[in-house]
Amino acid sequence: MSRTLQLTEQLISRHSVTPEDAGCQDILAARLAPLGFECETIISGPDHFRVTNLWAKFRGFGPAAPAGRAPSAPDLIAPRTLVFAGHTDVVPTGPLEQWTSPPFTPSHRDGVLYGRGAADMKTSIAAMVVAVEEFLAANPQPNLSIAFLITSDEEGPSVDGTAVVVQQLKARGEPLDYCIVGEPTSVDRLGDMIKNGRRGTLSGKLSVKGVQGHIAYPHLADNPVHRFAPALAELVATEWDQGNEFFPATSWQVSNVHGGTGASNIIPGELVVDFNFRFSTESTAEGLKSRLEAILQSHRLDYELKWTLGGQPFLTTPGELVQAVSDSIKAETGIQTELSTTGGTSDGRFIASICPQLIEFGPINASIHKIDENVRVATLDPLKNIYRGVLERLAAL
């Protein structure tokens, strides 16, 4: 059994349904501390939703002074930092009777490892740790600092996890240069896609006011559904932006509509509409808010609107990190990876605020959150090798 597979199975065996870590981070810290990592556990959240976060840092060695010369100021410049980020929490299992094998008992069938978190994302974390172990064994004094930011609150509200650690790092002035988030980004083959950005998410709950009344006497009522219909048509037809070479155009979508009491003879007094923007870097949250409210006001609606900003968009344009990951994937698999910004949100949205170069890369994502979640065993060590290749390439810069 490879060391990557062994650690993956250890992590899968822990019942770490969000926000529980179930000792996963203790396993990781026990592997990292002997390598010279300073490991810090950060607990956050209320008593009923305790979140465990691990921040572990190995401080690299700056450029060596030339032979015969004492170190000077340039020699003491701190090396750049690569952060491996991920989460030990997993989504609930769903009906246990529908699993072919118990979700927290690692099981093998036809070269496939089954278990909750196999793809999202305990395999990535195991591969990252083993990659670092191998890298430091070969490079005990690298010109690169390495860190791990691991949370148990990614599959939940994402309030007391990575966001809290990022705020603490920002307050400390902790420099981060590169970050790899181990999200399962591959589609058909390991390495065929990495995420170099994500769209922002902005949600709204709109309440359009009317006057309730008998449906046979519409002149004595004011139907908010009818009032809102023209505004809805305009919102649907609006082009918010055209996107760019990395992002599709911003999308506005309605997710829920509710009006009425359930009776068929009552005009409702209120219409409630839930909607969401998934927006590119061509738009801002404030700009979208302003434009939408201008449309509502142009239709003279009596309304209330509450906004929730779930995350800002972020983008890493091709540079040192993208090149290192792409080259490492090509060397290990022969694949020329595709850059993509599709999909939902990740904790990358928090880290990107303090880290200029961030990508997401991990195993095939076809089974994530499903019954019988799985990963092909043959991809575990290649994933580890890719992460190690990134370390080697960045340390050589």
Image (cartoon, helix red, strand yellow):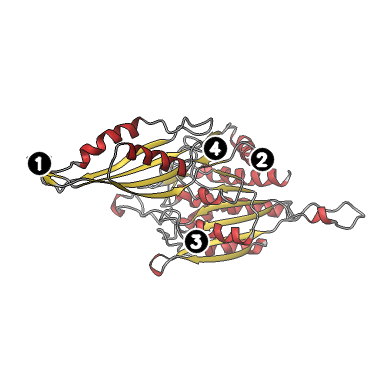
Q: Kindly report which numbered mark, 1 or 2, lies closer to the viewer in this rendering.
A: 1
Contact, mark 4 vs mark 1 (Cβ under 8 Å): no
Percent x, y for residue 223? Answer: 18, 41
| Marked residue nearer the N-terminal end (3 or 1) | 3
Q: Amino acid at mark 3?
A: Cys
- Asked if residue 300 is positioned above or below residue 354 in the image, the reply reads above
Percent x, y for residue 337? Answer: 56, 33
Q: Kindly state the secondary structure of the residue where label 3 is placed.
A: helix
Q: Amino acid at mark 1?
A: Ile
Q: Quadrant of residue 109?
A: top left
Q: Kindly state the secondary structure of the residue where label 1 is placed.
A: loop
Q: Residue at x 15, y 49 (%)?
A: 261
Q: Amino acid at mark 2?
A: Glu
**Disc number placed over residue 320 in the picture, else none:** 2
Percent x, y for residue 141? Answer: 75, 55
| Marked residue nearer the N-terminal end (4 or 1) | 4
Q: Of all residues shown, which one is farthest toward the bottom?
A: 47
Q: Kindly report which numbered mark, 3 or 1, lies closer to the viewer in this rendering.
A: 1
Residue 354 visible in the snapshot? yes
Q: Nearer the viewer, residue 181 or 172?
A: 172
**Disc number placed over residue 24 in the picture, else none:** 3
Real-space Cα distance between discs 4 and 1?
59 Å
Real-space Cα distance between discs 3 and 1?
59 Å
Q: Which residue is disc 1 drawn over?
A: 215
Q: Which residue is disc 4 drawn over?
A: 191
